[in-house]
Image (spheres, rainbow, N blue to C red):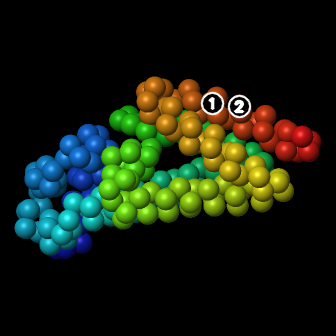
């Protein structure tokens, strides 16, 4: 098996295991068994488990933000695009095996002890915030609306992960509608 294939198999297995069971509950031997990549090759690709975690988060970030953008871009009205973010969150929350936000989960496990993981989580959250800022600018709304929408989305992610329901996305969407109405009217 070539290095690129081994890397993808290892990342696929690690991501599923880390998201499903938590990073600290999963050993490199678990990743070896699930991926079919030998332990020697696994450590050649990722000399430390922390590197594997960071690589999983980076790859997941690209996929997650791409899926979000694809969904939002289906809507042409700039203000409705902001609400489409919450529609997409609801779809994500309904996916089989949804266990909350991977970055929040990993940060809760390793953020205090792994600067590399904390940096990767912060980069993801900053990119999501910047994406929302761009949508707010496109809609011609005050800049202050973006961090408010960000907190609504993040709160929905945490609540959905803990409660095991997609309902927080609809609640956050309703709050976002109220926020957008107030921003339009200057109040």
Marks 1 and 2 close (CB-CB < 8 Å) = yes
Q: Which mark is residue 170?
A: 1
Residue at point 57% right, 38% down? 155
Badge 1 element: helix
Where, quadrant-wise, is the N terminus in this rendering?
Answer: bottom left
Would you place residue 34 above or below residue 45 in this image? above
Relative to the observer, which residue lies in front, 112 or 86? 112
Residue highlighted by disc 2:
174
Residue at point 41% right, 58% down? 118
Residue at point 49% right, 59% down? 122
Where, quadrant-wise, is the C terminus in this rendering?
Answer: top right
Would you place residue 104 above or below residue 126 in this image? above
Residue at point 10% right, 53% down? 29
Q: Where is residue 185 in the image (x, y as percent from the top left)?
A: 92, 42
On screen, residue 157 versus residue 41, left or right, reads right
Badge 2 element: helix
Which of the 4 quarters of the picture holds residue 55? bottom left
Residue 16 in view (yes/no): no
Q: Position of residue 91 (x, y in %)?
A: 52, 37
Would you place residue 82 above or below residue 48 in this image? above
């Amino acid at each position: 098996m070539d290095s690129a294939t081994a890397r993808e198999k290892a990342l696929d297995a690690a991501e599923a295991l880390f998201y499903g069971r938590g990073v600290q509950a999963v050993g490199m031997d678990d990743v070896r068994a699930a991926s079919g990549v030998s332990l020697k090759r696994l450590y050649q690709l990722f000399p430390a488990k922390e590197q594997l975690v960071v690589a999983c988060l980076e790859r997941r970030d690209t996929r997650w933000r791409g899926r979000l953008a694809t969904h939002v871009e289906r809507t042409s009205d700039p203000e409705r695009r902001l609400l489409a973010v919450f529609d997409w969150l609801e779809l994500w929350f309904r996916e089989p095996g949804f266990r909350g936000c991977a970055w929040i989960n990993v940060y809760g496990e390793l953020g205090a002890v792994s600067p590399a993981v904390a940096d990767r989580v912060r980069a993801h959250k900053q990119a999501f915030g910047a994406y929302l800022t761009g949508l707010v600018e496109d809609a011609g709304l005050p800049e202050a609306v973006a961090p408010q929408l960000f907190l609504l989305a993040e709160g929905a992610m945490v609540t959905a992960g803990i409660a095991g329901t997609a309902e927080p996305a609809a609640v956050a969407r309703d709050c976002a509608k109220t926020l957008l109405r107030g921003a339009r009217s200057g109040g």
